[in-house]
Amino acid sequence: QKEVEQNSGPLSVPEGAIASLNCTYSDRGSQSFFWYRQYSGKSPELIMFIYSNGDKEDGRFTAQLNKASQYVSLLIRDSQPSDSATYLCAVTPYSSASKIIFGSGTRLSIRP
Amino acid sequence: DAGVIQSPRHEVTEMGQEVTLRCKPISGHDYLFWYRQTMMRGLELLIYFNNNVPIDDSGMPEDRFSAKMPNASFSTLKIQPSEPRDSAVYFCASSLEGSYEQYFGPGTRLTVT
């Protein structure tokens, strides 16, 4: 079992709709959770992080965490073509809070 | 700040050759990470340093890979000898103590023929 699992996609969403990206993790002791965005041919960049159960909102982005279900999600409201990218879910393992483990990413495509 | 700097941006080499990738972290950052990204395996952590000291190298694939950080502003990842399966994009990232946000460099695209 992979430590961080994501559906590879592609996920196709019409412009203006809500894009929902999901991630599960195996280490029940994980404490910190991240979403990175990676445009094609570019490096990953952090867009959201969450530590506590529940929702965290930042602009059009909402991260959701459910530690009991070991589930993290990212919602993107009012999706724009510029949101088309690969979204990487990442977690810090219980064994080391200094490093993060990445999922393989979900490719999101926003169609005009 | 110029961000994390990596060189070269592209490297094409023949199997068996030595390859050295270079990274300059953001000034003042305490942590430096080396990652490898492929379509098949995604983004994998190879090794990371804290204050120039290697902390976890459990992701280094085998003895052909080695990494050093002789000072706070420079790190190298060396592959000797290189093999076609080493072809990937290699990223360097740095972060500050107490912050989980990692800042990635532009990456080095390595092709081994």
Image (spheres, coloured by chain):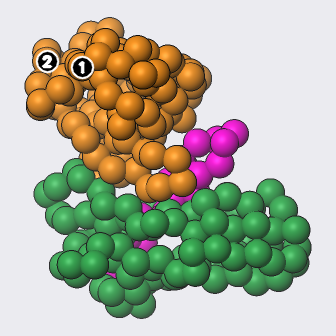
Chain coloured orange in the rendered structure: A
Residue numbers of the magenta segment: B33-54
The residue positioned 54% from the left and 54% from the top of the image is: A41
Q: Is residue B3 visible?
A: yes
Please name the amino acid that badge 2 sits on: Asp
The residue positioned 65% from the left and 48% from the top of the image is: B38
Which is nearer the eye, B109 or B71?
Answer: B109
Based on the picture, tell me whether residue A64 belongs to the magenta stretch.
Answer: no
Q: Residue A78 carries which label?
A: 1
Please name the amino acid that badge 1 sits on: Asp
The residue positioned 43% from the left and 33% from the top of the image is: A84
Q: Which residue lies furthest to the front in this view?
A: A112
Write down the chain letter for disc 2. Answer: A
Residue at the disc numbered 2: A55
In-image side of B44 versus B52 (left or right): right
In-image side of A72 versus B18 (left or right): left
Residue B52 picture quarter: bottom left
The residue positioned 14% from the left and 57% from the top of the image is: B98
Residue A72 picture quarter: top left
Which is nearer the eye, B58 or B93?
Answer: B93
Is B25 situated above or below A100? below
Find chain B in the image and tell me its colour: green
